[in-house]
Amino acid sequence: MRTKIRKEEYTALGDFILPSFERDQAVIAAKFPKLDTAFLNAFIEKLTFVKKLESSVVVTDEQKNVTVSLYKTATELNNELTVLNSYIADAGLDTSIITKLKRDLFIHNIEAAILKVEAVEQFVTKHQAELEAEGMPTDFATTLDGYKVELEAKNRLQNEYMNRLKKLTEINVGEYNALYVFISKIANKGKIIFKDTVTQDEYTISKNISRMRAAKLKKDDKKDAA
C-alpha cells in the first residue's frame, strides 16, 4: 500500500533519500543494474525539475493574500451598511435590501453581493433626501460604488489565481508522479539490499516521511517561540 504523501512533501522526500542512494548506488546497482549512474543522474534531474514547479506554492500564498484583502473589504462594507441600515430604519423605509446584502457579505458570497450593491446604490439615490435627513452623508452612493469596484477587482484577481493554481496542479501532477516512480524504485531496491540492517530505514518511505514531518514540526515550533 502506497504511503499517503502530501504534494509539498515529494521533493523533500527526494532530498531525504538522495544522499543515501548516492552513497549506496554502486552497491545497489551491483544487484539491480538498471539503477546505474544514468538512473541516478535522471533522478537528480527530475528532482531538480520538480522543485522548479514549486512556484504553485507561491501562487497559493498570493491567492491567500488576495482572499484576505477581499474579505477585509467585504467586512468594511458590511460595517458601512450597518450604519446605512440605521438611516433607512429611521426614515421608515424597508431595510430588507440591506439585510440580504449583509448576509451575502457575511457568508462571503461575493458575486451575489456585488450584484446587490448596485441595487442598494439605486435605493439610496432614490431616497437620497429622506436618508440625508436622518444623517446619511451626501456622497454615500459614491462610497458604495467605490466598494463595489474594489470588490469586483479583488474578486476577479482571486478567481484568476484560483484558475492559475488549478492549471499548475493539472500540469504538475504528472511530474510529481514521475518523481515518485524514481523514489519508490530506489526505496524498494534499497530495502531489499539492506534488509535487517540499520540502513534499511533510510530506504523506508514511511520512516522518511515521519522524520520529515518531525523536523518540520520542530522548525515550526522554533518559529512560534521566536
Image: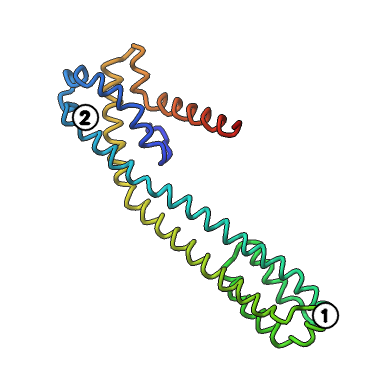
Q: Which residue is mark 2?
A: 40
Nearest to viewer (mark 2 / mark 1): 1
Camera-nearest residue between 223 and 18? 223
In which quadrant will I find the N terminus?
A: top left
Lower sequence index among marks 2 and 1: 2
Residue occupying image coordinates x 25% and y 19% = 24
Q: Which residue is mark 1?
A: 134
Quadrant hosting residue 98: bottom right
Q: Is residue 109 left or right of residue 177?
A: right
Q: Is residue 100 left or right of residue 1?
A: right
Q: Amino acid at mark 2?
A: Leu
In which quadrant will I find the C terminus?
A: top right
Q: Amino acid at mark 1?
A: Glu
Relative to residue 111, is residue 181 depicted above or below?
A: above
Residue occupying image coordinates x 19% and y 31% = 39
Q: What's the distance in space between the residues labelled 2 and 1, CA to CA? A: 77 Å
Relative to residue 148, is residue 183 depicted above or below?
A: above
**Mark 1, secondary structure of its residue:** loop
